[in-house]
């Protein structure tokens, strides 16, 4: 990726603020904050060195480039889960909750838990039928269900590689 908006430190496109040194080099807000907090030393001058040219950048909003933030957040992005296109500002919120994104069952975090995975839009249907999740929500341990999510996966016709190996 070679992009005028790309942060030279994390190599990503900034999701929030974009800051600039006096020579026009960019840094994203996340990296700026990380550098700033690693320099909490009274002996050092205020500001952070530009990662590209080492000139000292003020850490206040005076070095923020709102025009670039605006043009970056209105560019088109395509969701990798559902292939819909939208402006980046909406996209950043969308990807976190895209119905087509891949998720794991909340009941699967413990060893021997549920091994269902699927699309976010199918999670609700699964969760209402998942014995492991229901048990964990009610805080009860029912021995017979631990290590076996056979009924859920038969129900949803999902294959589960752990079904038999954990018996
Ligand atoms: Zn960065
Ligand atoms: Zn610079
Ligand atoms: Zn999507
Ligand atoms: Zn489950």
Image (cartoon, rainbow, N blue to C red):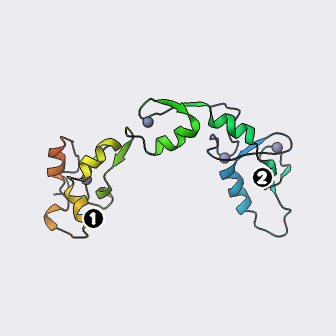
Q: Residue 158's quadrant in the figure?
A: top left
Instruction: Report whether the residue tagged 2 is closer than 8 Å to ligand 1.
Output: no
Which residue lies at the image location 61% right of the left edge and 44% below the top edge?
15
Percent position of residue 46, x then y:
84, 61
Asked if the residues shown at circle 2 and circle 1 are in contact, with their CB atoms under 8 angstroms apart, the answer is: no
Which residue lies at the image location 79% right of the left edge and 41% below the top edge?
25
Depth check: give the residue in front, 35 or 132: 132
Instruction: Report whether the residue tagged 1 is closer than 8 Å to ligand 4.
Output: no
Percent position of residue 99, x then y:
37, 40
Q: Residue 121's quadrant in the figure?
A: top left
Q: Is residue 30 visible?
A: yes
Dividing the image into four equal quarters, which quarter contains ligand 3?
top left
Q: Reply above or below: 112 against 120.
A: below
Measure the C-alpha gap from mark 2 to mark 1: 45 Å
Q: Residue 72's quadrant in the figure?
A: top right
SS for callout 1? helix
SS for callout 2? helix
The quarter of the rendered structure image containing the C terminus is bottom left
Q: Can residue 164 be seen in this view?
A: no
Q: Reply above or below: 132 against 17.
A: below
Percent position of residue 113, x then y:
26, 58
Left or right: 79 with respect to 88? left
Q: Reply above or below: 157 against 128.
A: above
| Residue behind mark 2 | 61
| Residue behind mark 1 | 137
Q: Reply above or below: 120 against 56.
A: above
Which residue lies at the image location 22% right of the left edge and 70% below the top edge?
140
Q: How crowded is mark 1: few (under 14 residues within 10 Å), some or many (20 or more)?
A: few
Left or right: 134 with respect to 11? left
Which residue lies at the image location 31% right of the left edge and 62% below the top edge?
110
């Amino acid at each position: 990726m070679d992009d005028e908006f790309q942060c030279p430190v994390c190599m990503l496109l900034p999701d929030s603020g974009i800051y600039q040194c006096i020579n026009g080099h960019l840094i994203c807000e996340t990296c700026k904050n990380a550098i700033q907090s690693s320099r909490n030393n009274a002996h050092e001058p205020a500001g952070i060195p530009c990662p590209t040219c080492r000139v000292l950048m003020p850490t206040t909003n005076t070095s923020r480039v709102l025009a670039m933030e605006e043009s970056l957040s209105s560019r088109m992005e395509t969701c990798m889960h559902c292939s819909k296109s939208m402006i980046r500002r909406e996209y950043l919120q969308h990807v976190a909750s895209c119905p087509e994104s891949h998720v794991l069952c909340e009941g699967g975090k413990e060893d021997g838990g549920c091994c269902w995975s699927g699309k976010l839009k199918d999670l609700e249907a699964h969760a209402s039928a998942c014995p492991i999740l229901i048990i964990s929500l009610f805080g009860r341990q029912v021995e017979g269900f631990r290590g076996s999510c056979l009924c859920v996966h038969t129900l949803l016709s999902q294959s589960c590689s752990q079904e038999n190996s954990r018996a």
